[in-house]
């Protein structure tokens, strides 16, 4: 990690390819974010990019040059299949140790001149106007698939590492910030995937370049970690239109698996829980 004084930003340019399996888990659990380069093959990337360019987008309330489309999986079977992308599903199933539930899917494009996205969290424990009650899920990971190179001048991702761990009121999940002195910028190449803990403060810098930068973002949660109240069920007609590979992830969006009345000494307690071993970060593969 080094500082680029002329731009007054800190750049996280570590060798992401060198991370072990355990180090990847540590990054998203402790730092709040993880890049995996070359996660999407060149052919798959070209296909996703071509499908995305057909989507009808709308501008954000703060800039027409920051554009997006909700639910792109409903517009394209090829884009829908990304929900079931095996490398991502495998990593998240290991990370969560639970069945995956798909939450939401968006396409975003930052065009030249966009002012960038303010630092914010996607995890808001009581729900919100922007994120609905889906934002109240206690654990969610958003997977951002970059369709273009993420360079310092073209709306790069920025993040406040470990902000999701902070108990101070400055990390109140409903706050937003223009900038933070210890934020880091994370460049990467097209085809990379960024895994984001939804409670981590993040955003983007302005697009000062001469090209657009686009991404597809798919969010998942473990089955136990549902919203605080029931949310709108999935439309049956939408479910019928989904590829077979995607349907296992389209469980009830209000699903919560827990026992409110659990006692102090329930029967059948286990004496092993490897998923929360402190040594889990030491795994090599």
Image (cartoon, grey):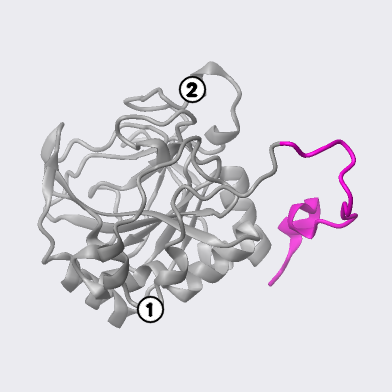
Residue 244 image label: 1
User: Can residue 39 be seen here?
Assistant: no
Q: How many marks?
A: 2
Residue 172 image label: 2
Neighbor class of circle 1 (other Cα within 10 Å; few <14, some 14-19, many 20+) is: few
Element on which disc 1 rests: loop
Q: Where does residue 19 sit, x and y in percent of width and height?
A: 60, 64
Near-viewer residue (7 or 116): 116
Residue displayed at 68% across by 61% down: 22
Does 271 lie within the magenta span? yes
Which image quadrant for residue 82? bottom left
User: Can residue 34 be seen here?
Assistant: yes
Q: Where does residue 203 sit, x and y in percent of width and height?
A: 34, 39
Q: Answer above or below: position of 190 versus 183.
A: below
Residue displayed at 31% across by 61% down: 146
Which image quadrant for residue 164? top right
Image: magenta residue range: 261-285
Does 69 lie within the magenta span? no
């Amino acid at each position: 990690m080094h500082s680029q004084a002329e731009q007054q930003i800190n750049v996280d340019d570590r060798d992401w390819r060198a991370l072990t399996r355990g180090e990847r888990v540590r990054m998203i659990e402790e730092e709040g974010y993880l890049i995996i380069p070359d996660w999407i093959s060149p052919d798959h990337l070209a296909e996703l990019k071509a499908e995305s360019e057909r989507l009808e987008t709308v501008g954000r309330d703060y800039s027409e040059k920051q554009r997006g489309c909700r639910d792109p999986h409903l517009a394209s079977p090829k884009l829908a299949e990304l929900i079931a992308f095996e490398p991502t599903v495998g990593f998240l199933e290991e990370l969560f140790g639970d069945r995956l539930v798909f939450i939401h899917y968006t396409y975003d494009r930052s065009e030249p001149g966009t002012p960038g996205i303010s630092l914010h969290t996607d995890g808001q424990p009581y729900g919100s106007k922007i994120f609905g009650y889906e934002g109240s899920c206690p654990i969610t990971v958003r997977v951002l698939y970059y369709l273009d190179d993420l360079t310092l001048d073209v709306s790069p991702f920025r993040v406040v590492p470990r902000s999701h761990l902070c108990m101070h009121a400055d990390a109140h999940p409903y706050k937003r910030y223009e900038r933070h002195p210890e934020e880091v910028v994370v460049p990467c190449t097209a085809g990379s995937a960024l895994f984001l803990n939804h409670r981590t403060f993040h955003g983007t810098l302005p697009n000062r370049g001469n090209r657009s930068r686009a991404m597809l973002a798919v969010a998942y949660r473990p089955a136990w970690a549902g919203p605080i109240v029931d949310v709108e069920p999935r439309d049956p007609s939408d479910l019928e239109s989904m590829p077979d590979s995607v349907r296992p992830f389209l469980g009830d969006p209000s699903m919560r698996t827990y026992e409110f009345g659990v006692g102090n000494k329930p029967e059948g307690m286990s004496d092993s829980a490897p998923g929360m071993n402190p040594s889990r970060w030491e795994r090599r593969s």
